Image (spheres, rainbow, N blue to C red):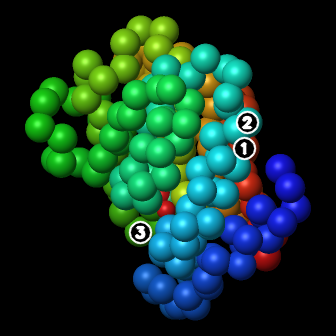
Amino acid sequence: MAESAVDTIQGLIRDIPDYPEPGIVFKDITPLLGDPNGLIATVEAMASPWADLGVEAVVGIEARGFILGAPIALALGAGFVPMRKAGKLPAPTASASYGLEYGVDTIEVHLDAISAGTRTLVIDDVLATGGTAAAAASLIDDVDGDLVGFGFLIELSFLDGRRNIDQYPIEAVMTVDG
Ligand code: AMP
């Protein structure tokens, strides 16, 4: 990808210190989503590594993975599948729980959304500890999907989240190392 596209994207992501709690630097992508050039550059940058890999389903993780995942699915000629917090999906689901710093979270996917062997790409905005991504991988495994890889906009490499999903291809548009 052209250096200037990454610069455009990077320049439209802002750091919000101490949100949602002290010590966390939140990567706010709303300025990027609101910028026409930034939005197109983001979708192109996140879709292009997977263009020739026969992706059939793009899973977006609630909530920012929905916003990015749907246009990436369109760009790849794939369908879109929401992966949601517990209790939000109306039909029968598979669910996976994962540990947070304090407590446990659960994500779910419709049992009939991904068939056995469906070539599936998982999209989210940020790879932090990798707990969410690992839970997503186990859900796709539960329904016998074929997990092609993970696409993130931002990888917080200092948290080494990729160690939790390192058996799969991982792409990130930008890496933050501290
Ligand atoms: P994790 O399971 O720790 O990899 O966290 C990933 C999820 O939390 C993603 O869905 C992100 O949207 C969100 N997240 C974690 N850390 C941040 C951060 N510093 N800025 C924005 N979102 C974050």
Which label number is shown at residue 157? none
Quadrant housing the C terminus: bottom right
Residue 18 appears in view: yes
Q: Nearer the viewer, residue 69 or 137?
A: 69
Q: Nearer the viewer, mark 1 or mark 3?
A: 1
Q: SS at mark 2?
A: helix
Q: Is residue 142 above or below residue 164?
A: above
**Residue under the image location 11 percent in, 37 percent down:** 90
SS for dot 3:
loop
Residue 102: mark in rendering: 3
- The residues tagged by marks 1 and 3 sit, at their Cα atoms, a distance apart of 28 Å
Amino acid type for the residue under numbered disc 1: Glu
| 50, 62: nearer the viewer | 50
Q: In the rendered image, which residue does mark 2 sit on? A: 49
Q: In this rendering, is residue 20 above or below 150? A: below
Element marked by disc 1: strand
